Amino acid sequence: MEERIMDLIREKKRVVAPALVLVFIFYFMLPLSLLFFPDVMNQTSIIPGLTWAWLYGFLQIPMTLLMAWVYHLKAKQFDRKIEEIKREELS
Amino acid sequence: MNLTYFLFFICIIVCTLIITYWAAKRSNTANRFYTAAGSLTGFQNGMAIAGDFISAASFLGIVGMIAISGFDGFLYSIGFLVSYIVVLFLVAEPVHRLGKYSLGDVICSRFPSNQMRLIMAIGAFIISILYMIPQLVASGFLLRLLLDIDYSISVLIIGGLMTIYVVFGGMVATSWVQIVKTVVLMSGTFLLSLIVFSNFQWDISSLVDRVKEGTPLGEDFFLPGHQFDNPIEFFSLQLALVLGTAGLPHILIRLFTVRNTLEVRRSLISSTWIIGIFYLMTLVLGLGTVALLGYETLIAVDPTGNLAAPLLARAVGGDFLLAFVSAIAFTTIVAVVAGLVISATTAFSHDIFHHILKKGKSTEKEQLKAARWTALGIGLISTLFALQLEAINVTFLVSLTFVVAAASNFPVLILTIYWKRFTQIGAITGMVSGLLASLLLVILGPHIMNVDGGWIVRDSVISLYNPGIIAIPIGFLGAYLGTIFSTKRKQSTEEFRQFYIQSQTGITSRRESS
């Protein structure tokens, strides 16, 4: 049973770890891009009247919510499989 | 104080006291006192987490910061939001599974010992008190400005209320006060945002144009770099904000107030939504302030910009709306300080009294009694401190809290949960070095050592206002070195594996459960 649980944990980690790295990159790229490419960031973006800096700043909010949702889905699936293992152990 | 203000304040005080009375009847066991017996739903807890997290500094401070420096103020708030991903991904579920009432429980589930527990309790205590006292001081000034009542009376009212909530109602009252705060805060800021937009005929571009007229920065207002001109400083601040929440004891103990990990995730996802929407609205309020009032008016009343939201309310809705926004600010403060009192209380009465002094053998009744007396003591002492600190600028302690949490609790939590070779010595050295490094760096930094009105009048040794970028690695390094050099028996792979499975799935091995 332990091996199967460890496998499941590893499987969850394969989704969660890259997602977290992505969040960090996406987030810290904002201050870094302001630092290194201020000219580009201050140009008007694809949305009229909005510079890249603001667009990127706003995008942090949907990114956060999206990632939280991705985690939630993965964790739900993980919980279900763990429950299955527990039930099999009992029977 | 005119009648409108008086009615709003009496309404808030009476409502929260009714909640406390109702909660007091339900807080008759230690489990209910510390965690509301896990009775909250995910969404309720999400509102309470948001209520615990959004301080008056966020509400009033960020609106003011956006009004003064535009983009950078908005960027500041984004850091707070993204920090919830770190909590959700790395610590939330393990903390819920491993702990009972406090962070000490979480760490001691792997390294059970009194020293470990004591260090964790001291850490939680320091962080909560460091955060609470400046909030009390700020609340005193705020009420004095808004209502024209004496500083000491305002501090006594807020200090008294927070103590009453926690002493009588424990976590149940604290949670519901925080939930009410979130509802009032969100509906109030939503209403105010709508009024701002309606003033510009719902046309964002005319709002933006008026902002450019209202600020001395003109066109440049929307460009980054007005608040943070030093990139290292800025990066350091962001780092502390993003990692700090995952080490804040008053937020993490809220994860014990729900039934299971599904509800833990629901809590965090709902609080992320609430906080995300809230910060978007603060942006509207900040821009609205510049557009409708102008920079000069704002600065003339209060150079820190903290009164932006109340001034905006008066400009668009007269005295009535100002009274409403002041009442929101008041609720915001009491909800946050109540959360801090209960977090400091748990650290002292559960970890130090119950586990260390009584060796885990005190009865339910004794625990409850100890918790209530501790809450009373903490409430009284911090109120007294706040009364004494009227003349001293302590607001920087608020930002310091995130640094201390990110440098001490955060590394120890992460390494305890995920690092196989981590040892108790490592956890202790990590906590101690993180705590000491962040405190020392602040003392050596320009908040305290400053030729221009610092506590110590001389040039600062370290130029960073936000020493996170140095303190956080020191916390991790302390934990690493302590582990490498500890000679004590290390945990076997098997022991860690059992712990790891428990932290990730909640399954305890038969050996332990029997």
Image (cartoon, rainbow, N blue to C red):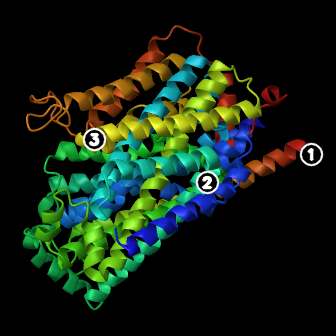
Query: Label 1 is found on which chain of the structure?
Result: A
The foreground one among B355 and B381 is: B381
* Residue B248, percent from left and from top: 46, 42
What residue sits right under mark 1 in the picture?
A: A91
- Give the crowd class for mark 1: few <14, some 14-19, many >=20 residues within 10 Å: few
* Callouts 2 and 3 in the same chain: yes
Instruction: Identify the residue at the far top of this view.
Output: B487
Quick check: B11 left or right of B142? right
Query: Label 3 is found on which chain of the structure?
Result: B
Instruction: Inspect the image, locate mark 2, and give the three-letter code of the amino acid beneath it.
Output: Ala
Kindly state the secondary structure of the residue where label 1 is placed: loop
Kindly state the secondary structure of the residue where label 2 is placed: helix
What residue sits right under mark 3 in the picture?
A: B394
Question: Which residue lies at the image location 11% right of the left edge and 63% below the top edge?
Answer: A39
Q: In the picture, residue B194 is in which quadrant? A: bottom left
What residue sits right under mark 2 in the picture?
A: B173
Quick check: B439 left or right of B413? left
Q: In the picture, residue B436 is in which quadrant? A: top left
Instruction: Inspect the image, locate mark 3, and give the three-letter code of the amino acid beneath it.
Output: Val
Q: CA distance from mark 2 to mark 3?
A: 28 Å
Instruction: Inspect the image, locate mark 1, and give the three-letter code of the amino acid beneath it.
Output: Ser
Q: How many marks?
A: 3
Question: Which residue lies at the image location 29% right of the left edge and 72% below the top edge?
Answer: B285
* Residue B119, percent from left and from top: 50, 23
Q: In the picture, residue A60 is in which quadrant? A: bottom left
- Give the crowd class for mark 2: few <14, some 14-19, many >=20 residues within 10 Å: many
Above/below status of A76 relative to A56: above
* Callouts 1 and 2 in the same chain: no
Above/below status of B397 relative to B361: below
Residue A70 shows up from this direction: no
Query: Label 2 is found on which chain of the structure?
Result: B
Q: Earlier in the sequence, mark 2 or mark 3?
A: 2
